[in-house]
């Protein structure tokens, strides 16, 4: 039984699709997790501290957004060389900006809420306020 049929050489297409899905899922998971972690961390720090740190991170975001996504990805892969590891690194270096902008905007709003001001007045550390009170 071959639900997807066979190719010209008699190989089952369904098993080949399942085998090819491994790399697709790996790209999807790595292409989301690492940019999400980088962008969330940088956006949280930039939004919470503000000032010069925020200005530096947001100018970096502006520089990355000035280039088209695909062109920047291809140029990073060309510098690093061929292979999936280069693709994963390029995804992490380019994909984090949207997460960082979103998290930064939320941090700018949330750090002025009553519970954040109360946490500051109770003497909680900045790390605790950022990652235990504001980020969740």
Image (cartoon, grey):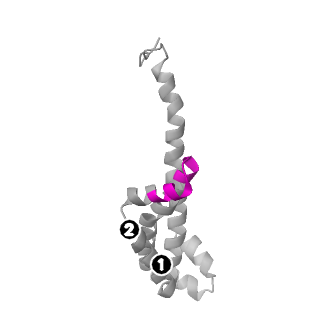
Q: Main secondary structure of the magenta part?
A: helix
The answer to which of 65 and 54 lies nearer the viewer is: 65
Of circles 1 and 2, the one toward us is 2
User: Whole-percent x and y of residue 20?
Assistant: 51, 32
The number of numbered badges drawn on the structure is 2
Placement of 135 over or under 112, stated as above or below = above
> Given the current orientation, which residue lies at the most extreme top position?
1
Give neighbour class at mark 2: few <14, some 14-19, many 20+ (Cα, 10 Å).
some
Give neighbour class at mark 1: few <14, some 14-19, many 20+ (Cα, 10 Å).
many
In 3D space, how far apart are the residues under numbered discs 1 and 2 (Cα atoms)? 18 Å
Quarter of the image for residue 69 reads bottom left
Residue 121 visible somewhere in the drawing = yes
Lower position in the chain sequence, tag 1 or tag 2: 1
At 41% from the left edge and 16% from the top edge, which residue is drawn?
Answer: 5
In the rendered view, does 95 fall on the left or right side of 122? left
At 43% from the left edge and 15% from the top edge, which residue is drawn?
Answer: 8
Placement of 35 over or under 57, stated as above or below = above
Read off the magenta span: 75-87
- Per the image, label 2 sits on a secondary structure element best described as helix
User: Whole-percent x and y of residue 89?
Assistant: 55, 57
User: Whole-percent x and y of residue 85?
Assistant: 58, 50
- Per the image, label 1 sits on a secondary structure element best described as helix
Residue 115 visible somewhere in the drawing = no
At 51% from the left edge and 41% from the top edge, which residue is drawn?
Answer: 25
Quarter of the image for residue 3 reads top left
97 magenta-colored: no
What residue is disc 2 on? 65
Q: Which mark is residue 47?
A: 1
């Amino acid at each position: 039984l071959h639900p997807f049929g066979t190719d010209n050489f008699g190989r089952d297409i369904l098993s080949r699709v399942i085998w090819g899905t491994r790399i697709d899922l790996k790209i999807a998971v790595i292409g989301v997790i690492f940019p999400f972690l980088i962008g969330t961390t940088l956006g949280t720090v930039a939004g919470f501290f503000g000032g010069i740190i925020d200005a530096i991170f947001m100018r970096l975001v502006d520089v990355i957004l000035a280039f088209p996504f695909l062109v920047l990805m291809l140029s990073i892969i060309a510098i690093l060389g061929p292979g999936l590891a280069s693709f994963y690194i390029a995804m992490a270096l380019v994909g984090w900006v949207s997460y960082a902008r979103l998290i930064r905007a939320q941090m700018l709003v949330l750090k002025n809420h009553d519970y954040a001001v109360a946490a500051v007045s109770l003497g909680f550390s900045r790390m605790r306020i950022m990652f235990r009170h504001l980020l969740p």
